[in-house]
Amino acid sequence: MTFLNYLLSGISLGSIYAIIALGYTMVYGIAKMLNFAHGDVIMVGAYICFFAVSRYHMPPVVGVLAAMAVCTVLGIVVERLAYKPLRAAPSLAVLITAIGVSYFLQNGAQLLWTPNPKVFSSVVGTGRLALFGGQLTVSYVTITTIASCIVIMIALTLFTGRTKMGKAMRACSEDKGAAQLMGINVNSTISVTFAIGSALAAVAGVLLCSAYPTLVPTTGSMPGIKAFTAAVFGGIGSIPGAFVGGLLLGVIEIFAKAYISTQLSDAVVFAVLIVVLLVKPAGLLGKKVSEKV
Amino acid sequence: MKHTAKKMLSFVIVLTLVVSLCSVFALADEGDAFKIGGTGPLTGGAAIYGLAAERGAQIAVDEINAEGGIQFELKYEDDTHDAEKAVNAYNALKDWGMQLSLGSVTSAPANATSAENFNDRIFALTPSASAPTVIDGKDNVFQMCFLDYPTQGGASAQYISSMGLAEKVGIIWKNDEDYSTGLRNSFVDTAAELGLEIVAETTFAAGNDTDFSVQLTEMQNAGADLVFLPMYYQPASLILSQAAAMGYAPKWFGVDGMDGILTMEGFDPAMAEGVMLLTPFNADSDDPATKAFVEKYQELYDETPNQFAADAYDCIYAYKQALEAAGATPDMTNEELNDLMIEQFTTMTFDGLTGTGMTWDASGAVSKGAHGCVIENGVYVGLD
Amino acid sequence: MKNKTLNRNARKNFATYGLVIAAYAVLQTMTVTGSITSSLKGMLVPICAYVIMAVSLNLTVGVLGELSLGHAGFMSVGAFTGVTAAMALQNVVPYPALRLLIGIMVGSVFAAVAGVLIGIPVLRLKGDYLAIVTLAFGEIIKSIVNNLYVGVDGHGLHLSLLTNKLALAEGGKIIINGPMGITTIEKLSTFTAGFLLVMLTLFIVFNLVNSRSGRAIMAIRDNRIAAESVGVNVVKYRLMAFVTSAALAGAAGTLFAMNYSTIIANKFDFNTSILVLVFVVLGGLGNMLGSIIAAAALTILPEALRQFADYRMLIYAIVLILVMLITNNPVLKGYVDIVKGKLTGRAKKTDGPAPEGGAGNGK
């Protein structure tokens, strides 16, 4: 039973990583940039939801929607101001800009909302289900997180596979020049991608803080790095890859803590990542691009 | 690329120069006030501690200056909870003309700045850096907080044992933090002496401090009926809420860093019901001085002060008492003040918000009592 | 044409040496005459350490062409092994300068060993996957050092992982105390030592880049398959650049650590790796002079912004974003050029930059 409990915790943590990783992977797939500010968008989303629910006593649903709306706008604004002017620049320049945006969001949040930790009240309540005569407990947050993760994954797969916008995204990710020649507005496609990625970040922020309720301006940074790892783990640019990578990372992290050492759990997680990448150099579900000669 | 790099660099350099020129003009005047400087994390993840200390100290300085007697000028510089930046901040304060120091707020930076204090002969009284290495071997570095190593962890174990609070004790501690590790070590040592059984011990570290399901499951499986949490309130609040979500409800025993948990915005006090802790400062106290301080702090900053603010407030008043007793004047050099302060602090007795009858020994460690408190219905109630 | 390129490179390298020597001379004179602020004086050694970090990372990122996100890990290895060596020899070697030298050598050797161990698997990968694996190694090193306990007594060094039970003999002392790191470091680093190490670093890097091996490394960067097809040993040369870079970072780590009385493993985290990467990108890939200036300017910048108090880091972030935009956006760059042209006027024509050469890789 303890094993099952650990597994559930792992899946729950992994689902959060997966949602964040989905945002990472979408942006990477299309803009070919590592958006290091993604973790901080999560933090902004969580703060918006916190203020809506705890301070202005709105229903949780409104809080989540407000967080998504604000993050979407934030994502588009950041993309317009900081990333769009660098569309033709080397990818490292964009990476450093993203780091600058990340510092900006963290420090801005600290000035606006003070560094004092806020306690996020879970949007789905704190109840739990007891199974097998109470030996296995599953909190509502865990159930919601896992369910949202699956729903988001399926929705994104359908969106990119079936809709016109989704197809445009895939086209851009394959070859921007060719996509443009086919009449696709590359700029607006990238903006839409950022909007979706940021809305996902808001959802991830709300779920993250529902499960782990302390909210500070640096809340997003560590989950951001872990999710980035998860995205690479699964094969960056691949939607199912981010899902699988996130889940596995969460489970490995919890198991490493439980069965190896709480002190070295991060080392174990990263060691597994290295081994996987050595065996499958493009991640678990990543596309292997053959070199052009 | 070479071309652009040059342009960019000239831009950065010009900017840096302009900014540093501005700071030259901003240099302060030679006044007739004692210049007290301190470093602390005013930005970044640990900013809550640095800001609290800065604000607490500022309130004390404003009160003292308003009285018209001895005058202080206070300056806090940001060290982002990092030893390198703390030394930079310390040097900036030296350029400003710091005569007396409040050291650093947190332990790791304080280890670095206290060595500088020692070399430069600038007396330091740190409000809250509790690691023994901060004062070790430095005759002019003193602490206002508990020295966590020998005092607090041991006192907690003693308290639990003498009150018969638990049969089986579990410990969750943060193994990459001086404060937490020091408390845990002294707790374990004393527990072994007293025959208190520790059934489970588990750790976490920065970057890995959100999910506690494994640690809590371990405690539960080991049958711990009391869990000792030597840590600051932020991770502690996460542990309490996750334990509640799991339906695990042992007795909780905290330390002074736990103070502040009740003032977190959005925290459900029911979660901390029955949590016991040893703390030198209690914002809900009836003591008139504490009440006045808390009211002032709330009025200015719209939040309840934690022990860092109270410790820093006490530091300023301790300086006032020592300077008055020594007959020191603001035109003295830092070396002269240093010798006077060492003499005063090792002989004087000080009453402040965080304790009465405080005394310091030559090592720089403070001796003051800790109160056992329990949280009942969202307020601290004294335990005796 | 080839000759001309070489000459230009040589000129540029000498300019770099000259700038470093001039900066040293000025700052050292200021220190001796006492006209330097404590604040700047305190930053001299860390600036040297960051300059070495930036130049060495530029070797990986600019010359080898691979993104490394774990460079601080090598700095960590160098810092902890170097300081341990210097401390363990405290009673054996009486001269502080020699102890520092031994420390730096030990630090760079251990970092080089770590470079080999990490480089062999890492360099099989490419692009962002390589980057993430270096990040992973950086985190693993941090995690291990955080749980490492080292003590010294009459019998030599004692090591322990995870627990602080070292069983030291009478008179022994703990050097590395797990997450608390090393707390009683003797401050041996001096600005002169830092300066010499910077010069040595530049000497090593310039010689490597301008040698046959350096050309092989850059050929691999520009086109791996073409390089392979003409018989360049890809693995060997990639590893050579990576390990050199690691060893230099290790030396920088020892220099840095021995400037403070305390050092902890968490100092060398992902953020520090990123910080050094920012120096490199801002200074220009493959441009060592740029790295030096960027490292110095960006180390001073947050200190110069102290008067803005709480807004300091926010302004730092804005400056960082603006600089990246101005230097990389064609439209903004155009405006800057116009302004600059007006300001400098004729001066620009006389020493106008030569056309892009081999060293300035714009990717």
Image (cartoon, coloured by chain):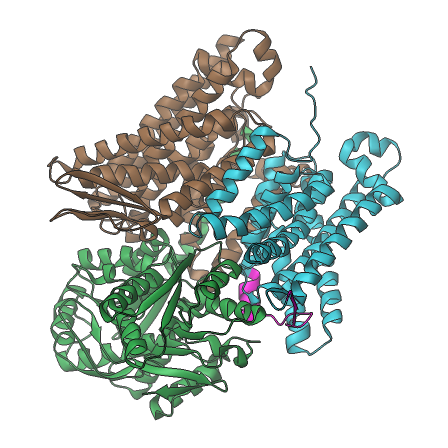
Chain colours: A cyan, B green, C brown
Measured as percent of width and height from the top left, residue B373 is found at 37, 83
- Between B247 and C47, the residue placed more toward the observer is B247
Measured as percent of width and height from the top left, residue B79 is found at 38, 58
Quadrant assignment, res B64: bottom left
Q: Is residue A176 left or right of residue B370?
A: right
Q: Is residue C57 above or below residue B40?
A: above
* On-image quarter of the N terminus of chain B: top right
* Residue plotted at (56% across, 65% down): A215
* Residue plotted at (29% across, 78% down): B159
- Between B291 and C84, the residue placed more toward the observer is C84
Q: Is residue A129 magenta?
A: yes
Magenta region: A108-132
Q: Is residue B184 above or below residue B292?
A: above
Q: Is residue B154 left or right of residue A261?
A: left
* Residue plotted at (61% across, 45% down): A248
Residue extending furthest top? C230
